[in-house]
Image (spheres, rainbow, N blue to C red):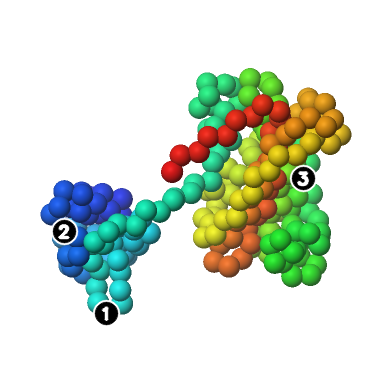
Amino acid sequence: MKATYKDVKSDILSKITKGEWSPGSLVPNEVELAATYGCARATVNRAMRELADDGLVERRRKAGTRVRTAPLRTARFDIPLVRAEIEGKGAKYRYSLVSNSVETAPDWLRARLNLPDQSEALHLVCMHYADGDPYQHEDRWINLTKLPQARSVDFSESGPNEWLVSEIPFSDVEISFSAGLADQILTDYLTCAKGDPVFTIERSTWWEGQAVTYVRLTYKPGHRLTTRY
C-alpha cells in the first residue's frame, strides 16, 4: 500500500521532533522522498506544504526545504460543526430548515463579500437544537457564482455548514464576535424576551479570492464560548 500524505507528514514530523533532522538542516527533495516512501511526488508535496503551513519547515524556490531553526507558532482554524458541538456536550442534536430562497445579493452583502452587481445568493435560515431547546439561529448566504450546485441541494435534513465543509475548503476567513439585543424575530426562535442579551458570531469565508459564504450565528442568553488553539 502506498503511503498517504498523512503518513509522509507524520513520519517527517517524527524525524523533526526527535532531532533526526536538526534545525536548519536541508530536507531531501521531493523526488528522493517520493522514492523513500514509495508514493507519488504530489503526495510528498502536499505533506511538505502542510508542514510549511504549520511553521515547521521553510520552503524556498531553488534553495530547497529546510527545517526551521525557530518553528513558527501558528493558529490553525477549523470551521466548527454545531452538530458535533452539541453532541460533544452530551445533548441530542436536532436541525430545522426555516427558509430557503435564491435572491439577488443585497447591497450590504455585496459590499461585505465584494460581489458584483446582480449577483445571486442562496439565503438559508436554520435552527439548531440541543435536547429540544433552541441552541443556535443560523442566517446564511451562499455565493451562487462560486457554488452554483448549492441551488439543487436539499437542506431540509442537514445544515448548510456540513455541506459546505465537505464541498469546498477555505483560504481566508473573517470572524466577528458581538453582543446585542434580541429583536422580535430572534425571540420567536430562541424563546427569549425582546431586548434580552444575545451572543452573535459573524463569519465570512473565501476560496482563492472568491467569496464562498457569509453567516450570522446567534445564541440565546447565557451561551458560553470556549476556544483552543
Q: Position of residue 160 (x, y in %)?
A: 64, 44
Examine the rendering and report whether any part of residue 47 can be seen.
Answer: no
- 165 vs 113, left or right, is left
Which of the two labelled residues, at mark 1 and mark 3, occupies the earlier sequence position?
1
In this view, the residue farthest toward the bottom is 62
Which of the two labelled residues, at mark 1 and mark 2, occupies the earlier sequence position?
2
Q: What residue do we see at 17% from left, 65% from top?
A: 25
Q: Nearer the viewer, residue 107 or 226?
A: 226
How crowded pointer 3 is (Cα within 10 Å; few <14, some 14-19, many 20+) is rated as some
Residue at which label 3 appears: 100
Between the C-alphas of marks 3 and 2, the distance is: 55 Å
Q: Is residue 191 above or below residue 34?
A: above
Between the C-alphas of marks 1 and 3, the distance is: 51 Å
Residue at which label 1 appears: 62
Q: Amino acid at mark 1?
A: Lys
Q: Quadrant of residue 102?
A: bottom right
Q: Is residue 219 above or below residue 46?
A: above
Residue 22 badge: 2
